[in-house]
Amino acid sequence: MSVSSDMWWSPWREAEGSLILHVDLRPDPDREQQALAVLDHDEQARWNRFLVKKAQRQYALCRAALRINLCERLGCPNRELSFGYLEHGKPFAKVNGAPADVSFNVSHSGQHGLIGFAHRDDFGVDLEVRTPGRDFEGIGSTVYGPRERLALAATTGRDQAVLFYRLWSLKEALIKALGTGFSLSPSRFEVPTPMLEGEPSAVFRFPHRPTDAFWLEDLGEPRFAAARAYRLPTEEAASSKARSR
Ligand SMILES: CC(C)(COP(=O)(O)OP(=O)(O)OC[C@H]1O[C@@H](n2cnc3c(N)ncnc32)[C@H](O)[C@@H]1OP(=O)(O)O)[C@@H](O)C(=O)NCCC(=O)NCCS
């Protein structure tokens, strides 16, 4: 695989065994051509089916960056790497057809993407570029729970936009860690109270899966809201019970 030194991704956050890359998704025809050449036949066919140029670009640049970085981590050539998909579409990596021992998750919004790698099960990342001036309380009434809606109603203007996207990225990181996609309504769970009050991280449990604990962390920065979530192993979940209260 030949990729020039002009990489469109760079390390962004590294903590507790996970590395998150930032992917630069600004329009750049040369990069897009380079990225497209890294994709396999099925991925190129999917790229062709996108009707919106922005979505096409997000997909090609993120998927190629994912491929290149997975190959480096797994020590395999690009042609041996493929992807399988879980029931609700969450991709996982395969080398020569066998599932590889790595968790990853991808998110893209506007001109920014994130690719997270972890030696953790059920790992999810989410990124949301904040668009001002939307009907945040109206949208929130369909996707947020009662405490989240109250918190949103207590804010106005830019603070409301920041809170709306913070909650969105936290909830979507959890949904993506679980892998259920839209099949689990985000209004069926709420972010932990300490995080509603501004804490950057907390232990979380879905109401319908109270025995599974997830680590949830706000990674937002001025350019975008972002979050990561992963399922805690049983022993870590037990020792972090105190933190979740
Ligand atoms: C994929 C999904 C989970 C997120 O979609 P999205 O917001 O459009 O997209 P993101 O950019 O964050 O993530 C897309 C990436 O997630 C990965 N993905 C796809 N399905 C997934 C799933 N079920 N679980 C986890 N990751 C998934 C893919 O790598 C995808 O990128 P690709 O298509 O370029 O390969 C979507 O199907 C979904 O159901 N979202 C729930 C949205 C929601 O309810 N939000 C409200 C939060 S309050």
Image (cartoon, rainbow, N blue to C red):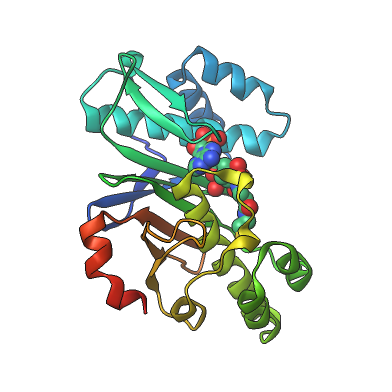
Q: Residue at x 42, y 43 (%)?
A: 105
24 to the left or right of 151: left
Residue 12 relative to residue 154: left or right: left
Measured from the top left, where is residue 53 in percent x and y? 68, 34
* Whether residue 228 can be seen here: yes
User: Would you identify the image quadrant in which residue 141 lies?
Assistant: bottom right
Q: Nearer the viewer, residue 190 or 48?
A: 190
In front: 98, or 82?
Answer: 98
Quadrant assignment, res 145: bottom right
Which residue is at a point 22% across and 69% down the rendered structure image? 239
| Residue 110 appears anywhere in the view | no
Q: Ligand 1 is found in which quarter of the picture?
A: top right
Q: Outermost residue toward the bottom? A: 154
Query: Which quarter of the figure has residue 88?
Result: top right
Percent of width and height locating residue 175 = 52, 52
Residue pictured at 50% horizontal, 46% vertical: 107
Quarter of the image with the C terminus in it:
bottom left
Residue at 71% of width from left, 34% of height from top?
52
Position of 245 relative to 85 (above/below): below
Quarter holding the N terminus is top left
Q: Is residue 40 above or below residue 178?
A: above
**Foreground of the two, 141 or 69:** 141
Q: Is residue 21 left or right of residue 227?
A: left
- Note whether 175 is above or below 36 in the view shown: below
The picture places residue 76, in percent across and down from the top left corner, at: 24, 20
Q: Position of residue 115 (x, y in %)?
A: 41, 44
